[in-house]
Amino acid sequence: MTRTSRSRVIHAAAPILCGLSLFACLAPQHPPVPIVTSEEPYESMSASIAMGKPEDALQSYETSLASRPQSNATRVLHGRLLMIAGKLAEAREEFDLVLAGDERNTDALYNLSLVAALQGRMDEQDSLLHRVVAIDPAHAEALAALGDRALSGGDTSGASDLYDRALATDPVNLTALLGAGEIRARAKAWAAAADFYTRAIAAQPDYPFAYIDRGQAREAMADRAGALADLSRAIELDPQYPWSYIDRGKIYVALRRDAEAIADFDVAVRLDPGQFEGYALRADARTATGDASGAITDWKRVVSLKPEYGYAYAPLAALAWKVGDWSQARAAFLDAYRFEEGNHSLLFCAALCAELQGRTADVARMVDPVLSRVPADSWQHDVARLLLDRTSVPAFLARVSRETNTGLKARLLFYAAMDSLIAGLDRVGLTYLLQLDGKGAPEDIETDLGRSELARRSPPGS
């Protein structure tokens, strides 16, 4: 799930989630004349919800009303408690009872729309919300919820109008403020987005996802200190939400604070072991700290969770190469090549792994098909010929010698070096590695592996 879609799902549930931190959110939009006495246990109910124990709050409320007549207002309040406790069918029954006697009761209609949304009945939710707005055109919660529905359907203009209408009635409506902020964020109007998120935070200081969204906006504006502060606050408010740690860890990576990034990714994968992104990010951070073994473990976890994530195989292969695990490196290079068939370097590196394993017969099977896929005058054709036939070495070295493109020359020098090293010509191979050092594009696999081979094979102290 993407960063934006995560926010959208969470924000759509904001009217319910706020009840977990503030009992006042349970009250109907238009407070009725109270029919309960001050002796009712509202304080204990509020405390129960704040502690994440909605069942206790529900029990307290039901006990207090057991011998009293039920009004529409108390039924709506009871239904909302049932909703927070996850008893959606029973909540629906309460709201239906209210509507049976008063079909224009907007509190019951709106809360029934929340039940429908939680049950995945989105068409019903839309219908109920439109009924609310037809009865009360200024109903902020219904307008904001319709704004969310419009935004999820890609109607940014319609969503913006609905949010504006909601905020005209209720300037501190959390859902509308977050939705209006997201519209600006999608347009990369980060300062305007941050302003809406700041207003959302002022309206509901204990709602963690407003801090997450403002943190994203601040990071986009290069305010990393502000972004870190927001994400840290979000973590304080909801330490069980893994994506806050992932987002903060990414900022630590950008700041080259790898140890802190790894610590955040550790928490993220502990909280959600089935989410591959935390492992991928931790693998990169571990690679940056020189922890090849830990990074390999993480990449293997990534591909076990999401085999179709093609980006994982090349770094896994490179790390396996660097620790001398030719079998694993070869398999990972071949997997990477399946996702990037035009990147013949991956296949060539797999062939080199076969050579290093002593499985020379496998090289032809892998490399032969490349000769028919690339132009005869291309560098890939020359590398393929080198791997298939050592008698082509002089011609290949002549190609290296006349190459004027520095980056490409570094790549060719890597293959010349590996050919010499595999043939037992260590001094010659080391010479070629020295020639490519400091040249080549960092993103090229040959550059990366060439530097690794030079470091591994250079005499101590050289």
Image (cartoon, grey):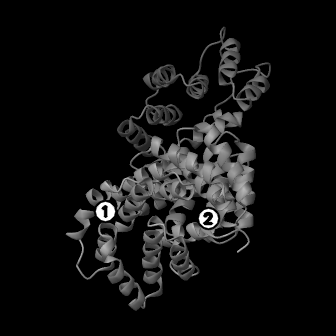
Q: Nearer the viewer, residue 458 or 66?
A: 458
Mark 2 or mark 1: whose residue is earlier in sequence: 1
Task: Write down the residue under mark 1.
Answer: 341
Does residue 206 appear to the left or right of 346 in the view shown? right
* Residue furthest front as drawn: 424
Residue drawn at (59%, 65%), measured in percent from left and top?
A: 193
Residue 406 sits above or below residue 126 on the image: below
Q: Position of residue 61 (x, y in %)?
A: 68, 18
CB under 8 Å between discs 2 and 1: no
Q: Nearer the viewer, mark 2 or mark 1?
A: 2
Residue 69 sits above or below residue 359 on the image: above
Q: Position of residue 194 (x, y in %)?
A: 64, 64
Q: Nearer the viewer, residue 133 or 304?
A: 304
- Residue 255 seen in the current view: yes
Cα separation between marks 2 and 1: 30 Å
Say what amino acid the circle numbered 1 marks: Glu
Q: Quadrant of the C terminus?
A: bottom right
Q: Residues within 10 Å of mark 2 (few under 14, many from 20)?
A: few
* Residue furthest top as drawn: 67
Q: Residues within 10 Å of mark 1 (few under 14, many from 20)?
A: few
Say what amino acid the circle numbered 2 marks: Arg
Q: Could you say whether the residue bearing mark 1 is in a helix, strand or loop? A: loop
Q: Quadrant of residue 221?
A: bottom right
Q: Which mark is residue 237?
A: none
Task: Write down the residue under mark 2.
Answer: 456
